Image (spheres, rainbow, N blue to C red):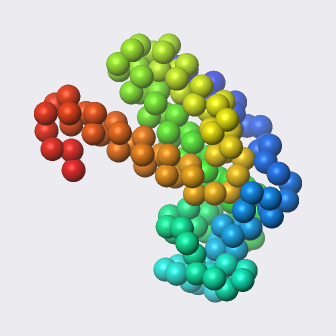
């Protein structure tokens, strides 16, 4: 019911820096270009021919977004991040709703999205949103296993 309000944050254009060289965004963009142009799906290199220092999940998702568009653009770079932030907010919403009620879950999800880290994850082409998503998912699964007294792995 409250999730349709979350879509507001994704309808506005990202407010990140206009230049991809700011905040070390050129490296993820160059990894994406290496996958799309050179087919290096396993081991990507940046514009200085250095091997990627980050896990390739973000690069793969952004490349899969770039390929159907035919070119790299801000949408293809930021879409995996926006999707990861949205899924993290949904996890927070459902966990909060289950433990504290629907309005509290919605407020927690919205606070996550409008917090400084949440907005930064939306506006920068980095691997941080996917890391946050996996940490949130792991936390919820660990909590669930603890409550049910089962092995969570």
Q: Is residue 134 visible?
A: yes
Which quadrant of the figure has residue 38?
bottom right
Residue at 72 percent of width and 62 percent of height: 25
Residue at 44 percent of width and 34 percent of height: 91
Q: Is residue 61 visible?
A: no
Q: Is residue 51 above or below residue 151?
A: below
Pinpoint residue 81: horizontal percent, then vertical percent.
61, 50
Task: Between residue 138 and residue 69, name the one nearer to us.
Answer: 138
Pinpoint residue 151: horizontal percent, then vertical percent.
15, 44
Say whether residue 78 is left or right of residue 80: right
Residue at 55 percent of width and 19 percent of height: 107
Residue at 66 percent of width and 67 percent of height: 28
Which quadrant of the figure has residue 14?
top right
Task: Between residue 80 and residue 64, name the one nearer to us.
Answer: 80
Say whether residue 57 is left or right of residue 111: left
Pinpoint residue 132: horizontal percent, then vertical percent.
50, 46
Pinpoint residue 13: horizontal percent, then vertical percent.
79, 43
Say whether residue 42 is left or right of residue 75: left
In this rendering, the count of numbered labels is 0
Q: Is residue 12 above or below residue 75?
A: above
């Amino acid at each position: 019911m409250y999730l349709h309000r979350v879509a507001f944050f994704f309808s506005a254009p990202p407010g990140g820096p206009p230049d991809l060289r700011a905040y070390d965004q050129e490296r993820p963009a160059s990894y994406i270009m290496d996958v799309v142009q050179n087919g290096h799906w396993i081991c990507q290199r940046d514009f200085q021919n250095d091997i990627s220092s980050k896990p390739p999940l973000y690069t793969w998702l952004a490349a899969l977004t770039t390929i159907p568009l035919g070119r790299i653009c801000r949408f293809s770079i930021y879409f995996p991040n926006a999707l990861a932030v949205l899924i993290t907010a949904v996890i927070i919403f459902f966990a909060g709703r289950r433990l504290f009620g629907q309005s509290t879950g919605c407020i927690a999800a919205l606070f996550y999205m409008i917090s400084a880290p949440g907005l930064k994850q939306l506006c920068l082409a980095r691997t941080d949103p996917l890391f946050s998503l996996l940490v949130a998912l792991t936390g919820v699964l660990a909590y669930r296993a603890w409550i049910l007294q089962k092995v969570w792995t």
